[in-house]
């Protein structure tokens, strides 16, 4: 399952499992494949386990911040895997520190364990109600609590979380693609915003945390983050991306010969765009899948070289043609500038850059790694200026209205990185720009 | 350049370069990225070098067989990188051995160096004419001969070879994609069958080996092996694959809702097929690019698991639909059977498997790794039987005639693995099945 | 300095240093040499740092327990390196857990940080007085407290600790050998039992914790643990070991031809023995310094093989001779049995085993890794039985009285593992046998 | 066995063994322990094998030169492990090259395989007589010739070679310490100069190569290279080194308080010296066995640091004393200078350096790695000058006459590096200084 979720984090991978009545921990820097042989060779019987792949947002990386966290405390052995960011973590951390708590990581996940340990309540349900009450922001949690598995989705519903059952065993994962890995005969459902699922020897039971003022599913999961074969928030990611591409074409009147995706991030939106616009879809750029984070390339010239090693326009396809280039979103514009340059170099007559997301204007604060405002190109330039900057003939973004028009329940989503309407104030002390205006 | 050719061999990578008047060698198991940091950190001045990525065909793998080979001999320091297989290697090796030659590898490339060393001729041109005369089969060679670079393409022209010039420096590579890596302002041309190019301080000069009875470009380079953004044999690989897909659709009358490629091998043929057949193209299968040769999965059940980890049908796309599944070729049928199963499991109503190559019936012998006859499914079953075996509703192959109809110069190609017409007898002693009937 | 202390712990190595106003941490499994290149390549300015080499006693190993520990807490950034074992850790840990503390390691060192974080006192001195008050047992500490270095030696004085100054910089280390590594012109002194030294921009100052009921320097540091070129507890380790060997000879009347040390643990005692007894000293056993923990040798037969790979009697020296074999102590008797066997096999006529320590009868509890009572051979056999068990002709131990007679201040030492007189009750919950009778 | 011979070469280690009728090869850079787990985990049946540890003399290092060499040739599969240096290799290599031989390594061992492959003789015995006839210099060989093991010692007898038998299996090794590793009940003998032993299914048989003009056992094996628990050339290495130390004391009248060895190279000579001179032996310098080639220390200051990390004078022992410091030999004087400095720094009143070998004045050429003449301190300074250079009060060497007086058969040895009387002219082209005067 972790392997199927590798796209959600490549910096570290870890598991905690029960063995002989205790929790065992194995956390490593690097990807799941680097650890899997060791993990799969274990033969001890285990009643349950949790795992995590981490991708460090502002809180910092390193083995120190690898998850799952595992502690001994007043509630016994408790391990935690956390997806999302707590938006009021700075205040909570300060309060806990004043009371004598010590923090061994710089991640906001550790404070959840402190809240649990300090709770005076009795019984898992009461303790979780008590401990999670002060939290604001995004937290999809998997916890191993002695032998009990606890899965929690925050009341806003920022990040997806699913549960499945097969042959009497329960499986919890962020995306359904991880559950597909278990094979065909599996029944699954979304864990709902605010729902807490407890799984133990007696089976599965649920209760709900108090509701949040609003729902705030992360629309970026659909645009970019989740894997296309997953369903998240009740939507097919694949189908949603095609619809975003269609919407992008709907108000576009550019004349062009080809629609070419940036591989593989723009594949599905490009296909939707091409279909709606009636322009042929073409694989005009080849991607070298052997390219990874292999080379140490510090300077700008070498970063350009890295893109050149990975993406290869096909001159016979794009030469002399007017190309609509489709990608999912535009952050700093650096890579797009390189790709547009490669296309022109390969002979493209015109390049029209189209993005299947609106203009990014703010950081996330709930778990998506978006750079500071000052680095976001859409904070500094309008589309015409961006076109000149990246060397494209035109640049167009999907509008927020069109994006919403392609969602079944548009009011349930968070669009804060596009429109600045943050569901929870961002006060997590992670970077100058993180305070919500 | 080696990095751009990684798809041609992942088992070992090596370079030989001149430094301080001598040849330096660095060969390693594994991919280019594992060696590149060390290679790029070298700072010594060098007048030239050659490199190789190896993918072990029947001759055997290991560091022992990694290339380039580098020797000291009567002709001084000579290093060799060889692409292809010598089809009369067994006889040549036996003759050399009788005369006292010793072999330190099991590859057929080493015998070329012995022939060079034993030649009584004087001057590189005369020595190469003399030494290469007894060779039959495929040999695109890059040699570093003291300070001189020699590039050779066998008279049959089995494997591609190209040369480019930029800022007074010459570059030789199997595929043009490696030359694109050098940047835009580069002029390049194919090295012709039988051509030998020598590059030294005085520039570049050419001569030709005696012609072969026929030309024999490997059609599998276009179908499967070369990278889509390359030109080989004067053809755009990308365009050729689309044309093979179109040809496949031309005589097909299947009724279907979607055309889905096996990612990424079937992408271009599927696009051509979809366009010609008027059926929508869809990315119905997601590929997990993090899947590599990560896991040690010895048993059959676990190999099935490996495919399940890598390829993910999208239920929302294929569910209830009649799917044309396009791949480039069918070897043993094992993987196709798993993919068809995954599609049906995801709800596909019908699956029609289409291959953009004819039925494989024999080994190659000139450098493509095709298993023994007995393992090739088309030697044991007709398309109807194959369909039942892999679980598809129908299976169709491109015919050799249609394949030829999409090539500019069809008579210049080798189709031996499809039609058994071997341009050179296969007598290289590599496996029971290798002798040509 | 860590490298010079490698003999005190080979399982993990770590450092914490100040950089840009924060604490940086690097902890790794394995020895210092595996980390040193990375550590030495850092170039950032730092005002101070601490380091640790760990050897896991009963508390358990793994990266989780590697030190220094580094936390953020109410006292800011605090890092801790701990040598010794807290003998009342179980009770302290239980009390802290009841109050909501969470533990991320299984080592007893973590609780010291909790006590510091929870203290209501103000100022480092008051906080340390408050936080360390409940501790019993052995704790030589180096702490990095923001920019301040704090070095603490427990009031019993179990473990050694030294401080030196050179060019205005202070250095603290368990043994003087680490200070010698800094070069000749260094002045050093012992940190006294109960002394706390604080070093900051204003220089060095000291205060003392309340005195313990008695002093309890670990005599095993002199017998076995410390490096011979160190001074600990005001004694030259080298000279002490020679004196123990002399004492051993004093009451011995065995007739023998040679005195042979078990290399290198018995070298100095053997030399002292030989000199006192007037019997020639000989290197009768060669040690292969390439032998390390190289082989995975699980079974008993293979463990025997491992000793055979490492220790090699010289037949020409021991053949036909009566050998006094000297080692520092006898734990389980397993290795001694193998060595005596090898000597007999090499032709020794008689082997008389002599140990420069008394009979081990109990665990330590203050930081030396001695197995459970049930595994200690002296709890099950008298010297005569041991001789038969290991195949020696006779076996003799140094008596506690003779041991004391060779120490300048015998009443200042702990001999609990020999005589059962434990200075602090052992209640750290680490193993059944750990409770002091 | 290889592990026991690790002191003879740490650069690379390799084995060749028979498996399924063919030779398998595994050669790796680094020490035996790095490869042993992989080697020991193999489970296939094998009828025989050979191994090698390499230490690169002038011929150059790298995986290219790792042994055993393994080739296919006119004599079938032949693998070779070679100890020693061929002194006429340059001429032989030139002649073979002229005839078309190719060389893939820069070691002189490869030419032995060419001579074997080119021989027109029939049968192993005749071929070996023919092929080895032109060789001059040092060659102890182990060959795997199909299923047959061939062990050869050159007629001069430069390097040691031994054979043993246990339970019907034959074992061949340079030193007897490798045979001891097989356990007690083993019978062994020296392979004689010029003897060739063949072992196959029918057992063991011997024949002799034509005798050399003289015998030339390498005296440096006894002084420094072989392991003390070995017998070589019929001598106990341990006993010989003690005798050299005694001889050194015999003509010495220095007044001193202590004899201190450079650990561990001077241990045995120091013991012999102390005994003969009636001065107490002391371990005045502690060696840190964790120090290895761990650090990358390029500059001179750092090299000094490396010695300081490894060797630690004990101030309590040497302080205020007059010390006789004993080592085996003096090459460049660099390390001795550092050690003498450390002793003085630790308070030694006088340091008298004594070497248990004569003054080194020339390179070896038969397999011991001695630097060029120009680097040998004894070519530039007399003992008085050396004393001033290294900071010692006096320096004395063993004389060649005294050295000879301690050998049973002094006329059978080579002393060329001391007296310039080379048994075979050195014409191997390895370095400017290598030609014998």
Image (cartoon, coloured by chain):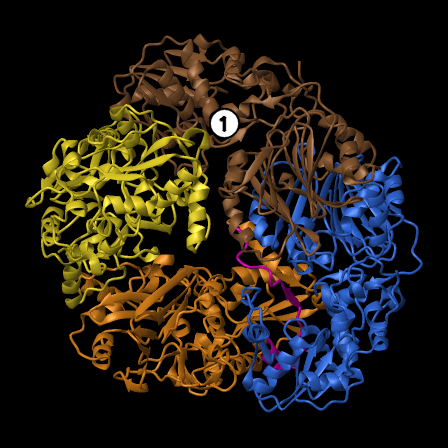
Chain colours: A blue, B orange, C brown, D yellow
Residue B145 position within the rendered picture, expressed as x and y whole percent measured from the top left: 28, 74
Instruction: Write down the quadrant of residue A336 in the picture.
Output: bottom right
- Asked where in the image residue D232 lies, by quadrant, the reply is top left
Of D398 and B332, which appears nearest the observer?
A: D398
Q: Residues within 10 Å of mark 1 (few under 14, many from 20)?
A: some
B222 relative to B34, above or below:
below
Residue C140 rendering spot, x and y as whole percentages: 64, 32
Q: Between residues A184 and D153, which one lies in front from this camera angle? A: D153
Q: Position of residue D206 (x, y in %)?
A: 12, 38
Q: Is residue C58 above or below residue D71?
A: above
Q: Residue D290 vs residue B206: left or right?
A: right
Name the image quarter holding the C terminus of chain C.
top right
Location of residue C282 (image quadrant)? top left
Residue drawn where x is 22% and y is 64% of the image = D102
- Chain at numbered mark 1: C
Residue under numbered circle 1 = C236
* Residue A280 visible in the displayed image: yes
- Image quarter where the N terminus of chain C lies is top right
Q: Is residue B272 magenta?
A: yes
Q: Is residue A407 magenta?
A: no
What range is drawn magenta here? B269-296
């Amino acid at each position: 399952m972790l392997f199927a979720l590798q796209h959600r984090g490549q910096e570290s991978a870890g598991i905690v499992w029960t063995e002989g009545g205790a929790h065992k921990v194995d956390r490593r820097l690097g990807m799941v494949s680097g650890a899997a042989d060791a993990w799969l060779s274990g033969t001890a019987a285990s009643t349950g386990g949790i795992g995590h792949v981490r991708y460090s947002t502002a809180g910092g990386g390193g083995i120190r911040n690898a998850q799952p966290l595992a502690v001994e405390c007043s509630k016994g052995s408790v391990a935690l895997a956390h997806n999302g960011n707590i938006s009021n973590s700075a205040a909570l951390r300060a309060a806990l520190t004043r009371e004598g708590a010590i923090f061994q990581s710089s991640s906001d996940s550790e404070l959840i364990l402190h809240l649990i340990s300090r709770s005076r309540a009795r019984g898992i349900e009461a303790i979780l109600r008590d401990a999670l009450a002060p939290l604001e922001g995004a937290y999809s949690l998997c916890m191993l609590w002695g032998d009990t598995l606890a899965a929690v989705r925050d009341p806003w519903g920022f990040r997806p979380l699913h549960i499945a059952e097969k042959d009497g065993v329960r499986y919890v994962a962020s995306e359904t693609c991880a559950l597909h890995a278990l094979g065909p005969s599996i029944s699954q459902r979304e864990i709902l915003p605010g729902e807490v699922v407890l799984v133990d020897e007696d089976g599965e039971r649920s209760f709900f945390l108090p509701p949040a003022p609003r729902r705030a599913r992360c629309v970026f999961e659909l645009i970019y983050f989740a894997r296309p074969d997953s369903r998240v928030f009740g939507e097919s990611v694949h189908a949603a991306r095609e619809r975003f591409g269609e919407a992008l074409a709907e108000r576009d009147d550019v004349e062009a010969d080809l629609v070419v995706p940036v591989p593989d991030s723009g594949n599905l939106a490009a296909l939707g765009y091409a279909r709606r616009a009636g322009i042929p879809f073409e694989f005009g750029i080849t991607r070298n899948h052997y390219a990874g984070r292999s080379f140490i390339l510090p300077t700008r010239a070498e970063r350009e070289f890295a893109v050149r090693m990975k993406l290869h326009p096909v001159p016979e396809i794009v030469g002399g043609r007017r190309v609509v280039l489709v990608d999912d979103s535009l952050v700093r514009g650096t890579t797009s500038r390189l790709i547009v340059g490669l296309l022109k170099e390969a002979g493209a007559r015109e390049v029209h850059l189209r993005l299947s997301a609106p203009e990014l204007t703010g950081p996330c604060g709930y778990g998506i790694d978006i750079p500071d405002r000052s680095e976001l190109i859409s904070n500094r330039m309008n589309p015409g200026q961006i076109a000149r900057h990246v060397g494209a003939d035109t640049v167009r973004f999907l509008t927020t209205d069109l994006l919403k028009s392609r969602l079944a329940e548009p009011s349930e989503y968070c669009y804060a990185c596009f429109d600045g309407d943050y569901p929870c104030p961002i006060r997590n002390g992670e970077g100058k720009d993180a305070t919500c205006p």
